[in-house]
Image: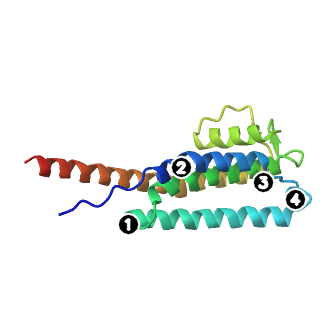
Amino acid sequence: MDKPPPRSLLWPWLLLTGGPTLLITAYFTVPLGSFGPHHPALSWTVFGVLLMLLAGLLLYEVQSILLESQRGLPALTIPLLAVTALLVFAGCYLVLAQHPGEFAGLNTRIDALYFTITTVATVGYGDIVPVSQTARVIVMTQILYTLVFLTAGATAVGQRLRGRLGERARRRRGGSG
């Protein structure tokens, strides 16, 4: 029986390295002037739609892994969706910080990304603090979003990797005997 041809490793590596690079570049270059205290309806609508869209895509990819679907590269797209979700929260914090009294210590895109990462890591250095009730609600939303969606994605990716490693180990044992 012929072995199937090996899949090109170029696409997964491009996705894993180029995807986050492109997303982070977009985060630092996309103008956010249309959002903020002068356009609250637009700001909240875009934020909500992006979070729901990302949650739906994450759940779809998690389902693909749990049902062992051979479609696409869900183990690679989940990390990209997670990075996108973190950047959406960082952008939200940056826009929210334009309104006085929302955050203490959050002034730049790097500050917003730093705060997002410390929130996900549950480190909380205390140098950037959500002051207003709105800012605190968004931080709580990020924590819950991370617990539900990003953790489910990470768990599914881990399950897929364990399954693939187990398959390889079984093939090696079966082939040497």
Look at label 1 and name its amino acid.
Answer: Gln
Cβ–Cβ under 8 Å for marks 1 and 3 = no
Q: Position of residue 111 (x, y in %)?
A: 75, 37
User: Sequence-wise, which precedes: disc 3 or disc 2?
Assistant: 2
- Most extreme residue toward the right is 38
In the picture provided, is 12 more to the left or to the right than 138? left
User: Could you tell me which residue is drawn at 38 percent across and 64 percent down?
Assistant: 66
In the picture provided, is 165 more to the left or to the right than 71? left
Q: Position of residue 104 (x, y in %)?
A: 81, 38
Look at label 3 and name its amino acid.
Answer: Thr
* Quadrant housing residue 109: top right
Which of the labelled discs sits on residue 14, or is there none? 2
| Residue linked to disc 1 | 70
**Distance of label 4 from label 1 (alpha carbons):** 41 Å
**Distance of label 3 from label 4 (alpha carbons):** 19 Å
| Residue linked to disc 3 | 134
| Residue linked to disc 4 | 34
Q: In the image shown, does 68 or 133 lie closer to the viewer?
A: 68
SS for tag 4? loop
Cβ–Cβ under 8 Å for marks 2 and 1 = no
Look at label 2 and name its amino acid.
Answer: Leu
Look at label 4 and name its amino acid.
Answer: Ser
Q: Residues within 10 Å of mark 3 (few under 14, many from 20)?
A: few
User: Sequence-wise, which precedes: disc 4 or disc 1?
Assistant: 4
SS for tag 3? helix
